[in-house]
Amino acid sequence: MLPVLLLASSLQGQSPASFTSHNYPGATATYAYGINNKGQVVGSYHNPTDDLDHGFLYEAGIYTTIDPPNSDATYAYSINSLGQIAGTYDDTSTGYTKGFVYDGTSFSSYQYPSANTPFAAVNSSGQAVGFAVSLEESFSYNINTSQSTLSNWATIPGCPSYSSSSTDAQDINDSGLIVGNCPSGGFVYNGSSFTIVNDPGGASSITGISNSGLLVGEYFASDTDPGHGFFYNSGIFTDFEIPNASYTYPADVNDSGIVVGWYTDASGDHGFVTNAKFLDKCGAGKVSCGDPIDIGSGNVSETVVDYTTVGQNPLAVRV
């Protein structure tokens, strides 16, 4: 049985359905990767001026750039309930890709010896997970004790790892449940055993888990399929695509069912923040939400969805 604790009925009080497109001002691409229960959002954007990727924190209408020292590419992937941000950056002083945690004041970095070591997430207990690229193996790292452990998940039945398709940890919640993907599909790992989770549409990867056990991810209908988003709550999969997007990537979810990620449309890559009601009404195709249109600024509201915009080239939907 999946360790998903939140009842579907507890999300039904959200009103209205909402969708927000995020476009960091001046950026040519924006990606939202993580959200906590306070609604703080982290991600990355591409700056055309220096042609580099930078991390960001979005809170209360304000973007803050997150870049560790000596970095020339930064990706903020996760933010926990304490506001600690985890991610990865390219270290110009060593030539390696390293994991980092930012506590709002200072950065700490981590590298498994002689390996590129990006962090995927950190929970409120200080347990971080990531992937040692050259070793083809996931790892955990305690930022409080500085202890690291390679997963050695190749020895665990149900989710084998091998050199051509390794087990990849994507997120960890405050209960220590780790999610990700392996050759068998998406997984939830409780510290001793794996539960394989695959959307009925195809083999899956789980990208985010809330503290209450809500899941988001993507599934692949075939080997050539670019992927489709899903939201999982209490045994129910809701498949979704952002309207008029050629690709949708849900990255994380909080206990309120707020989902963040990014999508690609004719104008480029955009971050998004949405909720379970939007995914149920529009993303799953139960209500026609029309074609996305650029509106310049402002808000479009109607009886189905409240659409808001952040940053430049905002997106809304005509209904």
Image (tube, grey):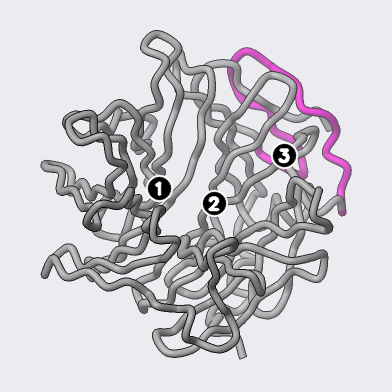
Q: Secondary structure at mark 3?
A: strand
Asked if the stretch drawn in magenta spans residue 302, the answer is yes
Give the residue at x 28% y 49%. 99
Residue 17 in view of the camera: yes
Three-letter amino acid code at the position of disc 1: Tyr
The residue singled out by tag 3 in the image is 247
Three-letter amino acid code at the position of disc 3: Tyr
Q: Which mark is residue 77?
A: 1
Say which quarter of the image contains residue 8. Answer: bottom right
The residues tagged by marks 1 and 3 sit, at their Cα atoms, a distance apart of 19 Å
Q: Which residues are magenta?
A: 286-306
Q: Which mark is residue 159?
A: none
Give the residue at x 75% y 45%. 226
Closer-to-camera residue (204/131): 131
The residues tagged by marks 2 and 1 sit, at their Cα atoms, a distance apart of 9 Å
Q: Residues within 10 Å of mark 2 (few under 14, many from 20)?
A: many
Left or right, residue 104 beside residue 205: left
Closer-to-camera residue (153/294): 153
Question: What secondary structure is the stretch in magenta mostly built from?
Answer: loop
Find out whether the residues at labels 1 and 3 contact each other: C-beta distance under 8 Å: no
The residue singled out by tag 2 in the image is 251
Residue 296 location (% of width, % of height):
63, 13
The residues tagged by marks 3 and 2 sit, at their Cα atoms, a distance apart of 13 Å
